[in-house]
Amino acid sequence: MIETKSNAELEPCLTAVMPVYNEAATVAEVVRVVLAQRPVQQLVIVDDCSTDGTWDQLQPLAKNEPRIQLVRHEVNQGKGAALRTGIARATSPIVIIQDADLEYDPAEYHRLLGPILAGKADVVFGSRFIGSGMHRVLYFWHSIGNSVLTLCSNMATDLNLTDMETCYKTFRREIIQKIRIEENRFGFEPEITAKVAKLKVRIYEVAISYYGRTYAEGKKIGWRDGFRALWCIIKYNLFR
């Protein structure tokens, strides 16, 4: 059994990589909560050419906080491209992906760090579909789509994940930095899952809570991204 300490009990060891695009309504609060977690040693924020004032909010946040490294794309490229930029700048032993909205809770970092710090895992996925964490009830067809994509990914990788599309993926830094990320948008999720599976590293999954957003609240992923994810499952498992 893996003993999981609280965030307050853990030493700084974590880089959070945060891709940001038009998140003016939530980004300041997310940055505050992330930096409040003791394991966070570095926060790399990549603004993907936001046009809603997000960049103006980020600059004063970074000015007096040495843990923040702030980068801006001059042309919007997508979440995968922002992650490629951010991951390359990570310096801590462990790296986690953190969205710039309020759907995932940084107070749960300790759950994802536990298996790695215990020496049991190299990569940890946070699952919204196992355990007893709180979940906002939202779109039925999104949940079906997620299940289908996870099933297809598992068939191709021979893993038994329950939530391939989760944002919360945590890696030993040397593992994620040696993977070449090719996808510029939401295809990052199936791509990185396929490439991690091929490395034959130790992968764990832990339960997390989830506070999903509606499209009116800023949710960006759509049905076209689902079809792209299917293609990425085929591409990165069968042709690479």
Image: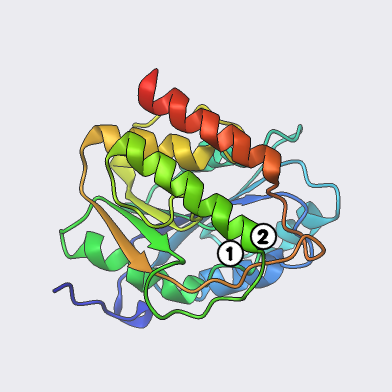
Q: Is residue 208 left or right of residue 59?
A: left
User: Is there a contact, CB below 8 Å, between mark 2 and mark 1?
Assistant: yes
Query: Quadrant of the rendered structure where residue 201 is?
Result: top left
Neighbours of disc 1 within 10 Å: few (<14), some (14-19), many (20+): few
Residue at left offset 61%, top offset 66%: 31
Residue at left offset 57%, top offset 50%: 145
User: In the rendered image, which residue does mark 2 sit on?
Assistant: 63
User: From where the camera sits, is residue 209 visible?
Assistant: yes
User: From where the camera sits, is residue 177 visible?
Assistant: no
189 to 38, vertically: above or below: above
* Secondary structure under the numbered disc 1 in the rendered image: loop
Rounded to the nearest whole Å, what is the CA distance between mark 2 and mark 1?
6 Å
Give the amino acid type for the residue marked by disc 2 in the picture: Lys
46 or 205: nearer the viewer: 205
Query: Quadrant of the rendered structure where residue 216 is?
Result: bottom right
The spot of residue 43 in percent (x, y) is 52, 57
76 or 68: nearer the viewer: 76
Residue at left offset 69%, top offset 43%: 223
Give the amino acid type for the residue marked by disc 1 in the picture: Glu
Q: Residue furthest right?
A: 52
* Secondary structure under the numbered disc 2 in the rendered image: helix
Name the quarter where the N terminus is drawn: bottom left
Residue at left offset 33%, top offset 66%: 206
The spot of residue 189 in percent (x, y) is 49, 43
225 to 182, vertically: above or below: below
141 to 149, vertically: above or below: below
Which numbered disc covers residue 65? 1
